Structure formats: structure tokens, C-alpha cells
Amino acid sequence: MCDFLQSNKKLIFASYYTGQMLLDYYYSVKSQLTTESVTLFDVILLPACSVYEGHFPGMPVTPGVCNIQMIKECVERIIGRQLLLEYIVQCKFTALISPLQHQKLQVRIEIKKPSPAPPKGERMEAIATIGQGEKEFMVFKGEFVML
């Protein structure tokens, strides 16, 4: 379940689902590499996922909301905590992603790190892109709350 509200020129997206909803159903993580400020995930889209039966039959395209959830799940893996995606500051879809043509993707995430042991309710910001090689499909900036 999720709600969308407009507040102070930000889209509030309150995702009430916690946990790894799409991992090993919509995508799988092939590798994860963290440097000082950036984590790179090599992910594989799973074309057999039933999401594509309705989006769109015969010409599957990744739903934007599933890509946002995939980013949220990757951020949770980095932090090691469940998060609530509270604000979407920016979300730009620059090209369609087909799981048949673009099965292997890279999710790049930069996090403004919370304190070492962040308390429940602490906020953090993440900037993410989904791409393949030089091609960028999605740019995202959002604010999360620790659960």
C-alpha cells in the first residue's frame, strides 16, 4: 500500500511495505560493490516475473514504481535496516527498460550516511541511477526514514 501527497513542492511517497518485496521475483542481485560514498549493484531483471504480463503483454516494460522499490531495497541492503521512502525529491525516467533487451542493469546509489547507529525515525537522503553501460534509464533522489 502507498499514498501520494503533494507538500512543499515535494512528492510524498509513503510506502507502507517493508522488506524485500521484489528481490528474486522482479530482479536478482548479481554483485554489490561499495566504495567510500557509492554502492554499485549489478542486477538482473527476471523477464518471467508476472508483472510483465500486464505491463505490457508482448512488449514488456519495467514499471516505474517497481524500479523505485528496487532502489529502496538496494538502499536497505546498504544500510542494513528497513526504511520508509518518505519523499521523492526527483524521479526522472529517461528511457524505457525492457527486461528482454536490458536484462543486466547497474543500480548506482550514493547515500548521505546516517550516524553509525541511527535511531528509529532518523532521516537520510539517497541519490540513485539505473543504467546499462553509458545509457541511463532513471535518475532518482529521495528521502528515507529509518524504521
Image: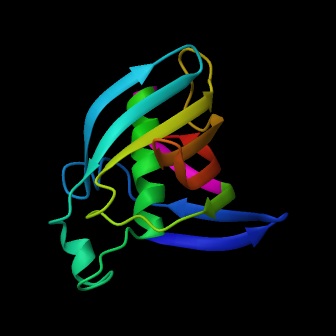
Instruction: Confirm whether the magenta stretch covers residue 49.
Output: no
- Looking at the image, can residue 90 be seen? yes
Q: In which quarter of the image is residue 123?
A: top right
Say whether residue 116 is left or right of residue 47.
Answer: right
Residue 144 horizontal/vertical position (percent): 59, 44
Say whether residue 27 is left or right of residue 120.
Answer: left
Q: Residue reaching furthest left?
A: 48
Instruction: Confirm whether the magenta stretch covers residue 82.
Output: yes
Say whether residue 25 is left or right of residue 35.
Answer: left
- Looking at the image, can residue 82 be seen? no
Say whether residue 125 is left or right of residue 10.
Answer: left
Q: In which quarter of the image is residue 60?
A: bottom left
Q: Where's the N terminus, which quadrant?
A: bottom left
Residue situated in front as seen by the camera: 96 or 13: 96
**Which span of residues is magenta-colored?**
79-87
Q: In the figure, 29 relative to 131: above or below?
A: above
Residue 27 horizontal/vertical position (percent): 26, 52
Q: Residue reaching furthest front?
A: 134
Q: In the figure, 124 relative to 36: above or below?
A: below
Q: Which color scheme did the rendering employ for the protein?
A: rainbow
Residue 117 horizontal/vertical position (percent): 53, 17
At 56% from the left edge and 14% from the top edge, which residue is drawn? 116
Q: In the figure, 53 relative to 136: above or below?
A: below
Residue situated in front as seen by the camera: 79 or 91: 91
Residue 134 horizontal/vertical position (percent): 53, 43
At 35% from the left edge and 66% from the top edge, which residue is drawn? 98
At 38% from the left edge and 67% from the top edge, which residue is drawn? 62
